[in-house]
Amino acid sequence: MNFEENYKAWLESNIIDVDTKEELKALTDIKEIEDRFYKNLEFGTGGLRGKIAAGNNRMNTYTVGKATQGLATYLVKNFESPSAAIAFDSRNYSDVFAETAARVLAANGVKVYLFESLRPTPMLSFTVRHLKTQAGIVLTASHNPKEYNGYKVYGSDGGQVTDNAANEILGYINETDIFSDVKMISKEEAVEKGLLVYIGEDVDNAYYEKVETLVVNKEMVKEKASELKIIYTPIHGSGNIPVRTMLKRLGYTNVHVVKEQELPDGNFPTAPYPNPEVPQVFNLAIEMAKEVEPDLIFGTDPDCDRIGVIVKEDSGEYKVLTGNQIGVLLSEYMLNARKETGVLSTKDTLIKTIVTTEMAAKVAKNYDAQIMNVLTGFKYIGEKIEQFEQTGSNNFVLGFEESYGYLSGGFVRDKDAVIAATLIAEMALYYKTQGKNLAEALHDLFEKYGYYKEDLISITMEGKDGQEQIAAMITNLRENMPKELNGVKVVVSEDYKLSKRVDRLAGTSSDIDLPKSNVLKFILEDKSWFVVRPSGTEPKVKIYASVVGKDVVDADNKCDVFVKSIKELLNVK
């Protein structure tokens, strides 16, 4: 059906409730109607994400129901007595969508374990493994604006479902008629039949106990944790209780919470874009810092899988560290701590994504450790952890991506800001005992490994036209690959859709042993590089850039010129 036929079908269906129909009848903009109905909300490898509204290309109880029916069909066909765990964050309708998913799964005979109140995404990942369920769902749109919500699906290993499982689930979703095929029972009936069980504090405590085991320098933390002064903001999200609980358990008692951002609120009144990558979300924390004078400031996003860190520079100005910088600091600290405590091994491994800083490779080499690259998306880091556990080939130390996601330990298979908060606090405490803050520690790493500078350009292209423009941009770049930028030769091109790496200097090509993805990467003769990829969760094309300079000023200038030349190449502003 075309968008007009889909629109009419929703208006005429007996399944669609009166309020939803009234919302649809009130629409007057034909472009808005087209955008809501020209396609189904896409189920990618991470699940669904979209604006909350009526329509088959939006997040609502009907699209959540359809996706869950497809998941239920997959579970029933592949497992005996299947079960699933469900969590939700502070976003608008997250609790409603979670209950909808639970009722659909229960109607299909799938036993559901549902958190009774909001929890971080990584705690859902832990719960899937802890309760040994075959799947997990978390209702969240991570750091997107308040208009959005989403639906992430996890496999039995606790990681987001990867390509094969996602494609099978997608097949069942596509076969499901949104009006006639979605089964649902009441919450009361599901409880009565033993198909809906609410998760209690025992799972929370099991998670907290596991996080405690990740402390690297246990004696230092035990003796000195109370000396570290921390400001923390949950940014109206689900991290408030878990992060503060863990810090308290480890002895970090000098913690100050930004009161205006403490309580859950899906409208994010103090942070319209609740993303710890955005400096403005820390304005209240920085104001608070003038009085508190903390050693460390950090904040977690709504589903508490990402964390941002603020440092005070010599100038007295507060600065948000980039995700790459936090990752490098953690890599150095954790490998050095393992060396100091006598457990460092050549099997120790860092895992990062292909768009994350190459400075981490320098850190790994310095400690004779290993580093591995995976596609963008923490599910691929989770896959590697699973491989390590099965084969014993490597020791997983840290996984991270430039977009503020970090993980240590094998009991969670997604980025985890609760774990990251404890590690970052430990790292800040260590450097405090050395008479340094994190800004000074980072400067030392630049001196040691080189002045790396990265940048990210996100270009939003909404609607059907935007998706077509993004596709055309990448196709054009693939067909007309640059030979140089600003007089510097492109020496390597990597096409992850074709799985080919071309070394232009050697005149050779080789296969890329990673899943196929519509991503292009170009490496230049001076070690700078850039990547172009469409976002898998937002209507954006993302351009990642990296340079290496002689010092901070040189790296900054070089990056500015490099980014400008990339924009000119792609004809974007």
Image (spheres, rainbow, N blue to C red):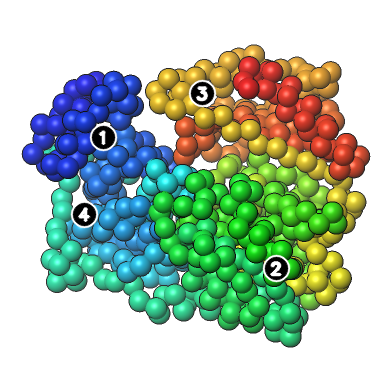
Identity, as a three-letter code, of the amino acid under mark 2: Glu
The answer to whether the residue labelled 4 contacts the one labelled 2, judged by CB atoms less than 8 Å apart, is no
- Which of pointers 1 and 4 lies earlier in the amino acid sequence? 1
Mark 3–mark 1 distance (CA, rounded to whole Å): 23 Å
The quarter of the rendered structure image containing the N terminus is top left
Q: Which residue is mark 3?
A: 470
Q: How many marks?
A: 4
Mark 1–mark 2 distance (CA, rounded to whole Å): 49 Å
Asked where in the image residue 194 lies, by quadrant, the reply is bottom left
Tell whether 222 sits left or right of 202: right
Q: Judge depth for marks 4 and 2 and give the one in front.
A: 2
Q: Disc 3 on helix, strand or loop? A: helix
Mark 3–mark 2 distance (CA, rounded to whole Å): 46 Å
The residue carrying pointer 3 sits among few (fewer than 14), some (14 to 19) or many (20 or more) residues within 10 Å by Cα, namely many
Tag of residue 350: none
Q: Judge depth for marks 1 and 4 and give the one in front.
A: 1
Question: x and y percent of residue 159 in the render?
Answer: 47, 55
Mark 4–mark 3 distance (CA, rounded to whole Å): 35 Å
Q: Which residue is mark 1?
A: 55
Q: Judge depth for marks 4 and 3 and give the one in front.
A: 3
Residue drawn at the location 28% of the way across and 20% of the way down: 30
Q: Which residue is mark 4?
A: 104
Is residue 486 shown above or below 37? above
Q: Disc 4 on helix, strand or loop? A: helix
